[in-house]
Image (cartoon, grey):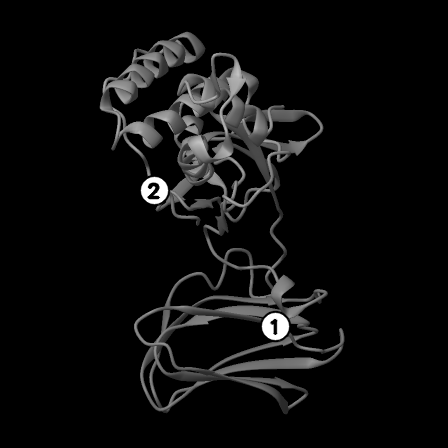
Amino acid sequence: MATKGDCLAKYLRFLDEATRKGISIPESKNADYKDKFNYFLNDALIYVSQFVKIPAVFTITQGAIPNQLGIFQGFDAQQYLPGTPKVFTQTGTKSFHLELDNVGTVEVAVNGVVTKTINNTAKRIFTAYKYNTGATSTDTVTITFKGDYPYNYKNVALYAYAFPLDEDVQVYKPYPEYDMPSDFMKFDSLIIKSDPRVYEMYKAYKWENNKKVILEYAKVGSFDIHYFRYPKTILPTDSNDTVLDVEDKAIDLVVLQCGIMATTADNQALSAWLRSLFGEKIQNVTGSESITENSVTTVYAM
């Protein structure tokens, strides 16, 4: 793998800023171009990764835990009106999940003693809550929706199982959402491995704003989400020994892109020549047509 120093040396060669008559140019003579390289390198890596893609895999495992209210019960939104509390009672409920919108209160009681009170204040949006109850298998657990104002609740699940932490309690939604990794750039494919005999493409998924993958709650298995990621960030202060997150075949593209950005403002002829080299090399590397216009993409981490 190439280092930052390897790319800097090649970058200066392309700019004809490495030597004069075979003698290395003093630091003071090419310091500006070196400074630009440090600041443009990360942008160049991101830009090139759109053409020479970096594959990655994100794995999700999923398995529906039985809801004590019944199979696929509790998903539908129900309305709460003041004066008519909604009560769910089960024996041995060790954890639960629920959502409500607007101002409302939920009381959780074990054997008639209130152990937790949820006061929701978020308006016009469903907010999810999930907790362990601390109950045993023989305790009676009551979950009561109450309050002074109308609101809706949905995705109510009572589980006969405890989880290590409250945050580990299984989400109960018809279509659970999973955040993609922060380095996610573009989706490739999704493979399901539901048992040792099943390894196949899975198409029953949905996307939300290209940031979340959404699966069916009832689908059990391990899901490998194949995607293309952004390269690891290189800071201007990183040393020349830092290994770059790029394939060897894309190194020249990264170097040339740095050169294009470094010379656009003060040497348009050199910048145009570097751009033409970039177009030729990217066609050889990817098989795509030459790029006629150069652009820098600003990337915001998810």
Residue type at mark 2 is Thr
Mark 1 = which residue?
131
Percent position (x, y) of residue 175?
A: 45, 50
- Residue 266 is situated, as x and y percent measured from the top left of the image, at 26, 31
Q: Secondary structure at mark 1?
A: strand
Q: Residue at x 67, y 81 (%)?
A: 140
Residue 71 lies in quadrant: bottom right
Left or right of residue 106, residue 297 in this image? left
Residue 298's disc number: 2
| Residue 176: percent from left, percent from top | 49, 52
Rendered residue at 46%/23% (across/down) = 11
Circle 2 residues within 10 Å: few <14, some 14–19, many ≥20: few
How far is the residue under mark 2 from the one under mark 1?
40 Å
Label 2 SS: loop
Name the front one of labels 2 and 1: 2
Residue 52 visible, this angle? no
**Residue located 43% across and 41% down the image:** 39
Viewed as shown, does residue 83 lie left or right of 268? Answer: right
Quarter occupied by the N terminus = top right
Looking at the picture, tell me which residue is in the foreground, 129 or 24: 24
Where's residue 95, x and y in %? 64, 70
Residue 209 in view here: yes
Q: Amino acid at mark 1?
A: Tyr
